[in-house]
Amino acid sequence: MTVALPRLLIAVLAVTQTVGYGVLSYSFAVLLTPMAAEFGAGIPAVTGAFTVAIVAAAVAAIPVGRWLDRHGGRLLLTVGSVAAVAAVMMWSQVTQLWQLYAVFVLIGLTTAATLYEASFPVIVAATDPSKRDMALLVVTIVAGFASSIFFPLTALLLERHGWRTALLILAAVLAVVTIPGHLLAVPGRRAHRAQPRAGAATAAIALRDKRFWILTVGFVAHSAAVSAVGVLLVGYLQRAGHTAAVAATLAGLLGVLSVTGRLTTTGLSKRYGMTSVAAGVFLIQAAGVAALPLLGSTVAGAAACVIAFGLGFGVATIARPAIVADRYGTNRYATIAGVMTLPVTLAKAGGPLAASSLTDNMFATLTAVACAVSAVSLMLASRVGRPALEGQW
């Protein structure tokens, strides 16, 4: 493997992830209302299709991981991109709600095969361990602008062409960027497995390792908390007395702060280790959301709480692959990460639904507890010895 390959790979994945998330995820929010109006269905009923996609992606996580470990990423990401384009085109033609749900099962499967959970194992396998955290950081920072690009782009296409034609245009963008990008830049099996770590853990050993399940509990709790806050924060702030504009502006800080948090975490991890830094960030999040009932009624107080929580908003995205790869090596990384991804993704889907039925004070309290549990889990996991690295799966 040449030095140039990881650099090219990282650059390509940064772009393909941006476009992939923009088309397969963020466009839905913009098109939600016109779709509901045309179908004659309520917003919650249409939104359910997106939840179905998340669940489908979670179910696909383990087989996707095992494929990546055995065959590398080129074929999976390329075929997944082709399927994603086809799915978006089918989305543009649906006329009934059940058809939308069926299409979003396919979209969920394609996201599992093309977005972060598929691309991160490719990055982990292709980059030197000393540069792995920075590579993950670069891709997530660039892809973090997906909403900033595709919210207005989709809205513009909707206004000028209607939601069906807008989707066809987005499908074309997805095809032009992701299919050749993944085909030409993503390593095949040989490059993917060129530098396996000697003595790396097999999946069977990882699943017998106590720390794996401690880490899983931590990331599941954090996923539920972050997802719930991301969906429900605007409404919470409005009920706390803020106008819709102020509430939306404050909630919008989460995206900006997620970049700040990732940069800070990656920088500090070189000195203190990713596990310790991520645990510290999660504790700051717990303090921030716990203070919302006390400080959230003023703009300054609410901003302080949002800033504290926002610093960790995207940290798990880079912390989880870095910690798992460091702990278990890269030989079976994708399979091991896929096992953890399944409950983490389900927590992401279920967190907002479960939290929506809580009172505001209970929501803040339980979210803070979830972040604290995440921090404690990471700290406990760091105190458990490494597994014996032997065996096969």
Image (cartoon, rainbow, N blue to C red):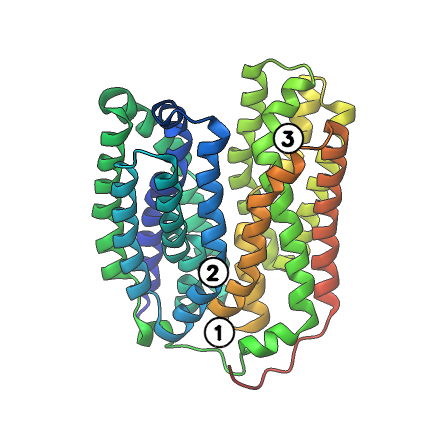
Q: Give the residue at x 32% y 29%.
A: 154
Q: Give the residue at x 62% y 35%.
A: 229
Q: Position of residue 204 (x, y in %)?
A: 57, 78
User: Which three-letter amino acid code belongs to the residue tagged 3?
Assistant: Val
Q: Give the residue at x 57% y 43%.
A: 261
Circle 1 — which element?
loop
Q: Which residue is mark 1?
A: 332
Q: Position of residue 87 (x, y in %)?
A: 29, 46
Q: Give the residue at x 35% y 63%.
A: 6
User: Which three-letter amino acid code belongs to the residue tagged 1?
Assistant: Arg
Which one is in front in this view, the residue at disc 2 or the one at disc 3?
A: 2
Q: Tally the marks.
A: 3
Q: Are marks 1 and 3 in contact (CB under 8 Å)?
A: no
Q: Which residue is mark 2?
A: 61
Query: Which of pointers 1 and 2 lies earlier in the amino acid sequence?
Result: 2
Q: Is residue 172 left or right of residue 98?
A: left
Query: Which of pointers 2 and 3 lies earlier in the amino acid sequence?
Result: 2
- Label for residue 306? 3
> Relative to the observer, which residue lies in front, 56 or 278?
56
Q: Tag 2: Cα neighbours inside 10 Å, few (<14), some, or many (≥20)?
A: many
From mark 1 to mark 2, how far is it between C-alphas? 14 Å
**Displayed quadrant of residue 309:** top right
- In the rendered image, the vertical position of residue 224 relative to residue 296, given as above or below: below
User: Which three-letter amino acid code belongs to the residue tagged 2?
Assistant: Ala
